[in-house]
Amino acid sequence: MPFVTKIDDGAYRVMLERVHGNANPNMFLLNYDEQQLMVTDLVIVPKHFVTADLIEQRPPLRPTARRAGWIGCRIAIQGIPSTGLIRVVKSGVVQSRQSVLNQWHKTLFLRSQRDQKSKGWLVHIMRCIERIGRTEFSLDDVYGFEKELSDAYPDNQHVKAKIRQKLQVLRDNGYLEFVGMGIYKLAVSS
């Protein structure tokens, strides 16, 4: 069974503070079969994949509510690339410890990105690459997301240069391999 695309969470302002301060926790997503009393899916989302652009503000509670005016948030899980969804249990089958650890370690470089906007760019580029749907792709394929990235980061007037920069960061950290002539290859599989 698939997970929901958005998860209700606590206070919006507090969550943003935690994300910006790198104090947000890792998340665990769990599905279970009530009749068989069994976990069917368990996924870890490392905290370095939760960026501010995934936190959505919910409407304030109504004036008649006990905590009138309180503003909660939702975490948009669909914005996390598949490499950020580490499966511990998949369709009732426990994955090997080594497989889980390998998946965990291959993206730890994101934690070194202290600037949230920079980390957001990297995660967004990872999502774009994933949507290309091939392990080998061209720079022009990623340029195809220029409008989307420009809309997401309106203060950046040099989106193509930023795409190249972030591809280099992904390459330097072993996430991608540069094949040559504007061609890249995923070095890690989801």
Image (spheres, rainbow, N blue to C red):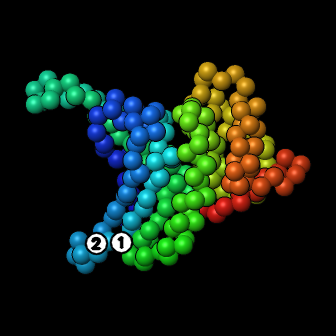
Dot 2 falls on a residue whose secondary structure is: strand
On the image, the x and y values in percent for residue 121 come to 61, 37
Instruction: Name the residue tied to disc 1.
Output: 40
**Image marks 1 and 2: residues in contact by CB distance under 8 Å:** yes
User: Residue, x 51% and y 47% (percent of image)?
Assistant: 49
Judge whether 3 appears above or below 19 on screen. Answer: below
Q: Which mark is residue 33?
A: 2
Towards the viewer: 122 or 132 = 122
Q: Quadrant of residue 144?
A: top right
Q: Residues within 10 Å of mark 1 (few under 14, many from 20)?
A: some
Dot 1 falls on a residue whose secondary structure is: strand
Q: Earlier in the sequence, mark 1 or mark 2?
A: 2
Judge whether 35 appears above or below 76 on screen. Answer: below
Judge whether 53 appears above or below 176 on screen. Answer: above
Towards the viewer: 71 or 13 = 13
User: Residue, x 70% and y 40% (percent of image)?
Assistant: 166
